[in-house]
Amino acid sequence: MMKVLVVEDDPFIREMAVTGLEDAGHEVIEAASGGEALRLLQAGIAVDALLTDVRMPEANGWEVARAYRERFPDLPVLYVTGYSEQMQPVPGGIIISKPYRMSQVINVLGK
């Protein structure tokens, strides 16, 4: 079981991700914005994996991933995005296009 942080500002997509990860046996923490994710990090949260949207209020997914990787250098990072954009992923980060299926996420986390 992994503790996964889901950072997604769309409540429907966030709920889908949380439910899918919990159904797969993972513990889930959720944040509704990049800023909320950064505040969780400052509060001392520890996670095993990060699933983050890219375009969000306050801080984007790239910024969230960089901040978490500073504290957890080997943290698995999955970005989900509906845009093809200038990529600034952290090393080893995986990009999944929206709309995505939870099976894609579960398969990546299971590796």
Image (cartoon, grey):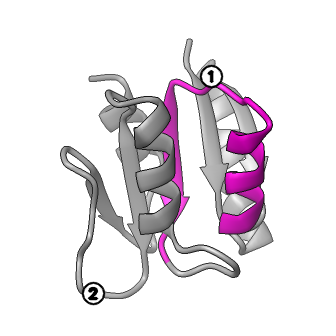
The answer to whether residue 15 is visible is no
Measure the C-alpha gap from mark 1 to mark 2: 29 Å
Disc 2 secondary structure class: loop
> Residue at the location (36% across, 35% down)?
76
Q: Nearer the viewer, residue 52 or 21?
A: 52
Which quarter of the figure is the N terminus placed in? Answer: top right
- Mark 2: amino acid: Ser
Instruction: Let me know if residue 111 is in the magenta part.
Output: no
Question: Measured from the top left, where is residue 13 in percent x and y?
Answer: 66, 66
Q: Is residue 4 above or below residue 86?
A: above
Q: Residue at x 50, y 50 (%)?
A: 67
| Location of residue 45 in the rendering, given as x and y in whole percent from the top left corner | 72, 30
Furthest toward the top, the residue is 1
Callout 1: SS: loop
Q: Earlier in the sequence, mark 1 or mark 2?
A: 1
Whether residue 35 is in magenta: the answer is yes
Asked if residue 39 lies left or right of residue 98, the reply is right
The residue under label 1 is: 26
Q: Which residue is mark 2?
A: 84
